[in-house]
Image: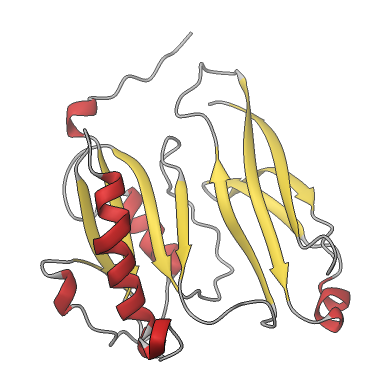
């Protein structure tokens, strides 16, 4: 049996805040921009709730990832939202050294089709959405991924993935039955079809894989 041991004294949590131009859209609380709402949520709720034994680092991302020295001064000037790059750079330890215990994305979304290949096996990803209500927006998204922090080699583990869609009936008809695929690097290791309808627009998909 092989067990992976980590130095938790160097573990940390990364909060990745979207700084693309779309975050300047004023559809937030009382006419605030999406970024203003995001900064308010991060400073007023997220960071206080995450305060504890592990340090929390805030990074901004658009097409690249940058450390945030002053959250209040952060502006929405980026050329686009590259969520995959934000996750992979965060997973590689962007912003400092040490084990990444969790990544928190604060974003209004982005269209990406490339699977994030280099995420660490023990780093769950959480998302905090900002912007207008998505009820009428045509959108297919992964809202949450949950899996064990560690496992013995060749042990079967469960990965729970919350998938959701929103939009018109025509969008759901066009959507059909999308396929959710889990990758290790560039190799697919598990997959499942996800049937979503306007009446059942959220599903938790459970994929079972063997730990490497």
- Looking at the image, the residue that sits furthest to the front is 30
Camera-nearest residue between 178 and 51: 51
Does 182 sit left or right of 172 as displayed? Answer: left
Q: Quadrant of residue 139?
A: bottom right
Residue 94 versus residue 3 in the image, above or below:
below
Placement of 124 over or under 133, stated as above or below: above
Q: Vertical placement of 12 versus 60: above or below?
A: above
Colour basis: secondary structure
Residue 93 appears in view:
no
Instruction: Determine which quarter of the picture holds residue 63.
Output: bottom left
Q: Position of residue 58 (x, y in %)?
A: 23, 59
Q: Is residue 189 visible?
A: yes
Residue at 42% across / 35% down in the picture?
122
Is residue 24 rendered to the left or right of residue 172? left
Q: Residue at 17% of width from left, 28% of height from top? A: 9
User: Which residue lies most toward the top here?
Assistant: 1
Tell me the residue at 31%/57% (across/down). 45
**Residue 47: x and y, percent?**
26, 53
How many numbered discs?
A: 0
In percent of width and height, residue 190 lies at: 70, 41
Q: Residue at x 35, y 89 (%)?
A: 24
Q: Could you tell me residue 151's position as x and y percent?
A: 50, 21
């Amino acid at each position: 049996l092989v067990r992976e041991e980590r130095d938790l004294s160097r573990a940390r949590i990364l909060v990745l805040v979207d700084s693309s131009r779309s975050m300047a859209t004023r559809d937030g609380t009382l006419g605030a921009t999406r970024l203003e709402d995001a900064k308010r949520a991060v400073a007023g709720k997220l960071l206080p709730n995450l305060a504890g034994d592990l340090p929390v680092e805030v990074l901004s991302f658009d097409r690249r990832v940058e450390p945030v020295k002053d959250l209040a001064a952060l502006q929405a000037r980026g050329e686009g939202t590259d969520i995959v790059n934000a996750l992979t750079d965060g997973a590689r330890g962007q912003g400092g050294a040490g084990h990444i215990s969790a990544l928190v994305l604060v974003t209004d979304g982005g269209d990406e089709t490339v699977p994030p290949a280099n995420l660490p096996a023990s780093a769950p990803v959480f998302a905090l959405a900002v912007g207008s209500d998505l009820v009428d927006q045509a959108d297919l998204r992964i809202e949450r991924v949950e899996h064990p922090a560690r496992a013995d080699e060749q042990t079967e583990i469960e990965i729970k993935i919350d998938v959701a869609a929103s939009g018109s009936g025509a969008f759901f008809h066009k959507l059909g039955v999308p396929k959710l695929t889990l990758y290790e690097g560039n190799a697919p290791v598990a997959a499942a079809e996800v049937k979503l309808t306007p009446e059942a627009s959220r599903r938790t998909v459970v994929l079972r894989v063997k730990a490497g």
